[in-house]
Amino acid sequence: MTTLLENDKVAISRAGTAYSATLGDVALFAAEQGGGGGALARQPGDVFLSFDLSPPTDSVELNGALIPDGAVDFPIVAARYPFMVSGTDLVLPDLRGRVVRGWDHGAGMDPDAAGRLPRAGDGAGGDLPGTTQDDALAAHDHAVYRRNTFVSGGTMQMVFPHSGSSSLDTTTGASGGAETRPVNVAMMFFMALG
């Protein structure tokens, strides 16, 4: 493991421009941006994930709550996300138990993007950040196996592998759990207010 000294130069990128700086320069920049302590501070409106059970003091859980006068009390958040503003209140998106999907933004990966449900606050729907979709399965079918049997008089009857049907229609047996889901891990979504 290499140990860097205070005056050793390291290559960094700031605002898209690469340059070299000493560790002292990097520490000074981090202190300016993060209010000291060497860590970059979150900006009002930044959304982040955590394993914590409650939000940090400067943040709220994204749980669909209404923050009375939130647009007045947190003007930077209101300006950054005007879709959450309802009068003078902020209406937070509810991300509890949800799988987050990248905004389609015309990519064509979300075939139902135009029908996305309205978001909190301004009520706009369609292909916009903050909109939601109900769960769904892609249209598909399942093969149903059957056998043919001959009955007296020479006619052929199709017999499905079940009993009690009065017609030739049938369905497959149900399988699976209570939802369709990807492999996942639970984390809480927070938003910085100040």
Image (cartoon, rainbow, N blue to C red):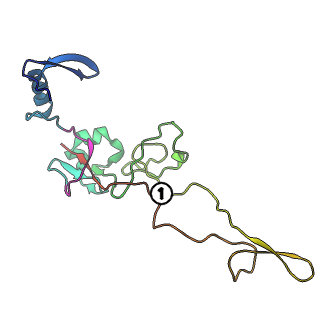
Q: Is residue 69 visible?
A: no
Residue 182, percent from left and from top: 43, 54
Circle 1: is it few (<14), some (14-19), or many (20+) Cα within 10 Å? Answer: few
Q: Secondary structure at mark 1?
A: loop
Q: Is residue 32 visible?
A: yes
For residue 101, side relative to residue 194 (left or right) = right
For residue 142, side relative to residue 115 (left or right) = right
Residue 45 magenta-highlighted: yes
Residue 133, percent from left and from top: 47, 53
Residue 45, percent from left and from top: 26, 42
Q: Nearer the viewer, residue 109 or 93?
A: 109
Q: Which residue is mark 1?
A: 134
Most extreme residue toward the front is: 1
**In terms of image quadrants, where is residue 155?**
bottom right
* Residue drawn at point x = 70 percent, y = 67 percent: 145
* Residue drawn at point x = 53 percent, y = 49 percent: 115
Residue 88 magenta-highlighted: no
Chain part drawn in magenta: 42-54
Quadrant showing the C terminus: top left
For residue 134, side relative to residue 62 (left or right) = right
Q: Is residue 124 above or below residue 32?
A: below
Residue 75, percent from left and from top: 23, 41
Label 1 is placed on what type of residue?
Asp
Quadrant showing the N terminus: top left
**In terms of image quadrants, where is residue 33?**
top left
